[in-house]
């Protein structure tokens, strides 16, 4: 499923945080969403800027994807993700950048998401995502990840549009 040279590609991460405190309070009154919402960012710069995406970024030398996703979420929205769990991995190929992207799901965090110079965060109901303002291929796998599933994929983009999409669900993605 992943390309033969996936291990040689630059690595990046995404975090999909799911929260819901089940106390029937409207979203925001206690600083936490009411039921099954996920944190997205309106990205201000970098790959995918202007779109709604999960927080994340490029893995730095000497860093594991899990260490990267914790650092990137802290840098982008000022919270500490406590339980990132690998939920997927995909190869992204485009006209100007190729990468292997490690996707994490998390449910525990400390702090309150805040706007930074990199990102503007907002909570969305998991069944009402802003899909028209997200990467087109997110609609293939994000609902599955938010529901606790796993996937492996290969997404080739040309001129900003998906040109070749291949996804497998229910795979073992445990590693780093
Ligand atoms: C289909 O392809 C993609 N889909 C989604 N949902 N996200 C993607 C895709 N390809 C790349 N990404 C994500 C993965 C990373 O979170 C970012 C790329 O990293 P970024 O440019 O944000 O890197 P930083 O280290 O944060 O930024 P600087 O380079 O500005 O330091 O895109």
Image (cartoon, rainbow, N blue to C red):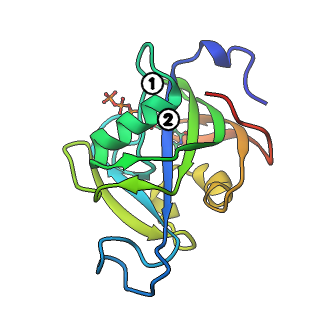
How crowded pointer 2 is (Cα within 10 Å; few <14, some 14-19, many 20+) is rated as many
Q: Are marks 2 and 1 in contact (CB under 8 Å)?
A: yes
Q: Position of residue 47 (x, y in %)?
A: 40, 35
Secondary-structure class at tag 1: loop
The numbered disc on residue 16 is none
Q: Number of labelled discs?
A: 2
Q: Is residue 38 above or below residue 68?
A: below
Mark 2 Cβ and ligand 1 under 8 Å apart: yes
Where does label 2 land, which residue? 13
Q: Ligand 1 is in which quadrant of the figure?
A: top left
- Measure the alpha-carbon separation of dots 2 and 1: 7 Å
Q: Label 1 belongs to which residue?
A: 59
Indicate left or right for 11 with 72 as reference.
right
Residue name at image x 28 percent, y 39 percent = 75
Q: Residue at x 36, y 53 (%)?
A: 41
Residue pushed farthest left?
117
Q: Is mark 1 within 8 Å of ligand 1?
A: no
Say which element carries label 2. Answer: strand
For residue 37, above or below residue 67: below
In the figure, is residue 57 to the left or right of 103? Answer: left
> Is 161 displayed left or right of 88 in the figure?
left
């Amino acid at each position: 499923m992943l390309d033969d040279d996936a291990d040689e590609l630059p690595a990046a991460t995404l975090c999909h945080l799911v929260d819901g405190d089940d106390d029937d309070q409207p979203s925001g009154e206690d600083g936490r969403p009411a039921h099954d919402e996920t944190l997205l960012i309106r990205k201000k710069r970098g790959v995918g800027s202007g779109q709604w995406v999960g927080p994340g970024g490029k893995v730095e030398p000497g860093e594991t994807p899990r260490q990267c996703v914790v650092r990137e979420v802290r840098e982008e929205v000022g919270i500490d993700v406590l339980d990132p769990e690998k939920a997927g991995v995909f190869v992204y190929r485009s006209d100007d950048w190729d990468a292997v992207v490690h996707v994490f799901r998390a449910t525990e965090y400390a702090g309150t998401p805040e706007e930074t110079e990199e990102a503007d965060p907002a909570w969305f109901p998991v069944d009402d995502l802003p899909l028209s303002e997200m990467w087109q291929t997110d609609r293939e796998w994000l609902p599955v990840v938010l529901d606790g599933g796993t996937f492996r994929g290969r997404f080739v983009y040309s001129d900003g549009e998906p040109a070749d999409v291949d996804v497998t669900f229910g795979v073992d993605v445990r590693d780093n």
